[in-house]
Amino acid sequence: MGSLLRRIWTRVAVSVGYYRGPRYMSELRKLWVRLRNPQADIRFGKYTYLGPGFSLHMPQGGTFITGVAVEFRRKFRCEVMGGAVV
């Protein structure tokens, strides 16, 4: 019985740590970026992943659009001023 529980726990830990957890956190980062920059046009393509520390600084608006399956690694930062488009 202990062996079965250990295998189940290992599967859960790996799933949360390497698959589901990072995807859920990426979705939360996308939401935060949009809420923090309400005047900007921000669109993320399907399967876009935002790593820890992702940051968009768009105080005057602008446009930020990604393609499909783009991956932003740890601590990516982009500053967009005026009506710039990225």
Image: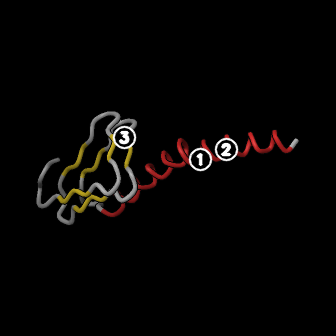
What residue does disc 1 label? Answer: 16
Q: Secondary structure at mark 3?
A: loop
* Three-letter residue code for mark 3: Thr
Q: Nearer the viewer, mark 1 or mark 3?
A: 1
What residue does disc 2 label? Answer: 12
Q: Secondary structure at mark 1?
A: helix
Few, some or many residues within 10 Å of mark 1 (<14, 14–19, 20+) = some
Q: Position of residue 86 (x, y in %)?
A: 17, 47
Q: Nearer the viewer, mark 3 or mark 2?
A: 2
Few, some or many residues within 10 Å of mark 3 (<14, 14–19, 20+) = some
Reading the chain from its start, which is encountered first: label 3 or label 2?
2
Say whether marks 1 and 2 touch (CB < 8 Å).
Answer: yes
Extreme residue toward the top, this view: 68
* Three-letter residue code for mark 2: Val
Q: Position of residue 12 (x, y in %)?
A: 67, 44
Q: Quadrant of the N terminus?
A: top right
Q: Position of residue 57 (x, y in %)?
A: 24, 62
Q: Secondary structure at mark 2?
A: helix
Residue in front for this viewpoint, 63 or 24: 24
- Seen at 32% across and 57% down, the residue is 75
